[in-house]
Amino acid sequence: MAGHSQFKNIMHRKGRVDAVRSKVFGKLAREITVAAKLGTPDPAMNPRLRAAVLAARAENMPKDNIERAIKKATGGEGENYEDIRYEGYGPGGAALIVEAQTDNRNRTASDVRSAFTKSGGSLAETGAVAFMFDHVGLIEFAPEVGDADTVLEAAIEAGADDVRSSEDGHEIFCEQTAYGEVSKALEARFGDPRRTSLIWKAQNTIDVDDETGERLVRLVEVIEDQDDVQRVFVNFALSAELMARLENQ
C-alpha cells in the first residue's frame, strides 16, 4: 500500500496506544459536537455526525462521552468552532494537508506553523498543495465483510470509483458529491462501516528514504499533537522496513 493507506495504518496502530488520553477523546468529542451543531443531532440523518460517532467508536470512546458531546450541541453549550485547512511541505518535498477546528484562528495558525518549523517543515499558502490531492469520500470495512471481488462488485454497483482491499480491510473511495449515496448503499449491503469520512487522497505518492521518512512521521506526530488539529493527510510512501520498525515502536 502507498500514500494515504500506508501512512494511515501506521498512525492508526500507533494511535491505539494513545487513545486513552483525554486529548484524543477531546478531539473526537469536538468533532461530534460540531457535526451535531451543523445538522440534526440524529446520526442516521446527519452523515458528518455519523462519521464522527463511528470514528469515536473505533477508538473505543465510551458511549457516555459520545452522548454527552451530542447533548452539548443540542443544549447550545460549548464553543463555536470553525473548520479550517492548512497546507505545507515537509522534508523531502512531501506535501501535507492539515484539517483543524478552532475558536481562535490566530492561535491555531501560530501553533500549526510552529509545529511545521520545529520539525523541518514549512507552512504554505492555502491551495499550495491541495491540487496534488482529491477531496473524496472514504468508506472502510473490516476484511470479514467479504472477499475483494465481492466488495469490488458491490462498490461498483453503489457508484464508487476505487477499491483497495488488503488483509487489513477494504477501503472504498468515491466522489465527494456521491459520498452520501454510496455510503448508504454499502451500509445496506455490509452493515456499519469501520470508518467513513471525507478525506484528502493524494493523486500520486513520492518515495522517501528511511531517514526522511522518520523525520516526516515525526513531523506528522508533532502536528497532530496540537489541540486544534483533527487530521493530517500526506503524499509520501514509506519502505516496508521502516513501516515495520515504526509499528513495533
Image (cartoon, helix red, strand yellow):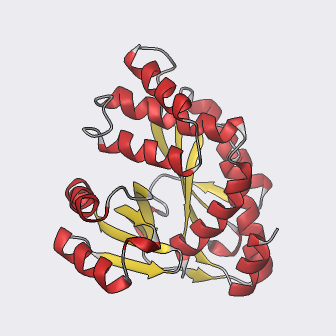
Residue at the (46%, 22%) spot, across then down? 80
Q: Is residue 142 left or right of residue 154?
A: right
- Percent x, y of residue 248: 79, 72
Q: Is residue 191 left or right of residue 211?
A: left
Residue at the (43%, 80%) spot, across then down? 165
Image height of 112 relative to 214, above or below = above
Image height of 241 relative to 127, above or below = below
Image height of 100 relative to 7, above or below = above
Quarter of the figure that contains the C terminus: bottom right
- Percent x, y of residue 151: 31, 77
Residue at the (79%, 77%) spot, across then down? 245
- Percent x, y of residue 47: 30, 44
Indicate the quadrant where residue 91 lies. Answer: bottom right
Callout count = 0
Residue at the (54%, 33%) spot, across then down? 29
Quarter of the figure that contains the N terminus: bottom right
Front-lying residue, 167 or 95:
167
Front-lying residue, 204 or 74:
74
Indicate the quadrant where residue 172 lies. Answer: bottom left
Q: Is residue 77 left or right of residue 216?
A: left
